[in-house]
Amino acid sequence: MATNLQDYEMMLIFTPVLAEEEFKNAQEKFISLIKENGGEIVHVNSWGLRSLSYPIQKKTTGLYVVIEFKAPSDLNAKLEIQLNRDETVMRHMITHLDKFAVAYNERKRNAPAKESKSKTENETVSSVSAS
């Protein structure tokens, strides 16, 4: 069963009224569901509270989390059912990742921290003045 794992990315938007502990428990609920059904978690990125582009259920903010995982393709149906049943999830999206998206996410996770903006601007100014 573990030989036919597909790469997926799931973005969840939870209701903003959750406390910190409830938010962590809600994340763990879906992470454990993936693991119990033969999947493996690659990376979890909790974005925290963000503004929404448009109101959802009369709310203008939401708690975002992005979970990158590998799982058999039949897990998506089970996951969809649980996501639709859970009242704390306002929106969700599961995306199948191709090999280029997996490579991009890997590079993005392992990239060194960006330099400060002022240092980059100073290098640009000095290179222009040197020309």
Image (cartoon, rainbow, N blue to C red):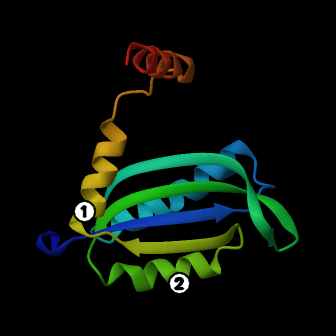
Q: CA distance from mark 1 to mark 2?
A: 29 Å
Q: Is the N terminus in the top left, top right, bottom left or bottom right quadrant?
A: bottom left
Badge 2 local density, few (<14 within 10 Å), some, or many (20+)? few
Proximity of marks 1 and 2: CB atoms separated by less than 8 Å = no
Disc 1: which residue: 100
Quadrant assignment, res 12: bottom right
Q: Examine the rendered structure and indicate whether residue 27 appears above or below residue 9.
A: above
Which of the 4 image quadrants contains residue 14? bottom right
* 96 up-or-down from 77: above or below: above
Which residue is situated farthest in the right direction here? Answer: 58
The residue under label 2 is 81
Residue at image coords 43%, 60%: 32
Q: Secondary structure at mark 1?
A: helix
Name, please, the residue furthest toward the front. 131
Q: Toward the viewer: 65 or 41?
A: 65
Q: Residue at x 49, y 47 (%)?
A: 45
Name the secondary structure under disc 2. Answer: helix
Q: Give the left or right position of residue 39, taking residue 29 as reference.
A: left
| Residue shown at 68% from the left, 51% from the top | 22
